[in-house]
Amino acid sequence: MAKYIDLHINNGDVVLDAGNNPTFLTDREVIAQDIVHAIIETGLANLLISDRGTGVNDDTKTRIKLLVEDDVRIMPGTVIVQENDIKKGEWWVTAQTLDFGKISSKINSAV
């Protein structure tokens, strides 16, 4: 039995199955989705993605780490925010959940 259940949201829209019914996420995937949405809703995703060498990234990464660590489902000290080495401008957040293992999600600039 799942501890957390939520609608699956992609690019601001509810994801539908073949019968046009909403799809759901559970547990680990819910936490990952919630974290990305929190980052987007605070505006930190836009700051991180739009920065082009102005030095804002370090401050923004720290703010994102603190935001993610405030989630009671995340193990403190495990949050990493990093840019994809191959695809510059693509950012990822990874963390260890208390109950469901590691999560890793791409940070987008829009829900």
Image (cartoon, rainbow, N blue to C red):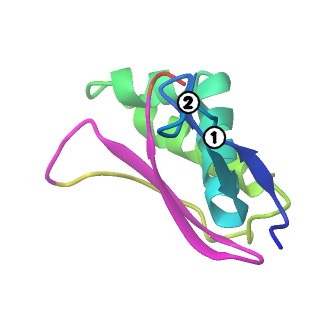
Predominant secondary structure in magenta?
strand
Residue 45: x and y in percent read 50, 29
- Identity of the residue drawn at 43% across and 32% down: 108
| 15 versus 66 height, above or below | above
Q: How far apart are labels 2 and 1 at the CA level?
A: 38 Å
Q: Quadrant of the C terminus?
A: top right
* Residue range corresponding to the magenta coloring: 86-108
Mark 2 crowdedness (10 Å alpha carbons): few <14, some 14-19, many ≥20? few
Residue type marked 1: Arg
Compared across the picture, whether 11 is left or right of 36 comes to left
Q: How many marks?
A: 2
| 26 versus 20 height, above or below | below
SS for dot 1: helix
Front-lying residue, 52 or 7? 7
- Identity of the residue drawn at 59% across and 41% down: 36
Find disc 1 in the rendering and name its residue. 63
Compared across the picture, whether 72 is left or right of 85 comes to right
- Identity of the residue drawn at 37% across and 28% down: 49
Q: Residue 21: which disc?
A: none
Compared across the picture, whether 54 is left or right of 45 comes to left
Find disc 2 in the rendering and name its residue. 20
Residue 74: x and y in percent read 74, 65
Upstream in sequence: badge 2 or badge 1: 2
SS for dot 2: loop
User: Which quadrant of the structure image shows residue 56?
Assistant: top left
Mark 1 crowdedness (10 Å alpha carbons): few <14, some 14-19, many ≥20? some
Q: Quadrant of the N terminus?
A: bottom right
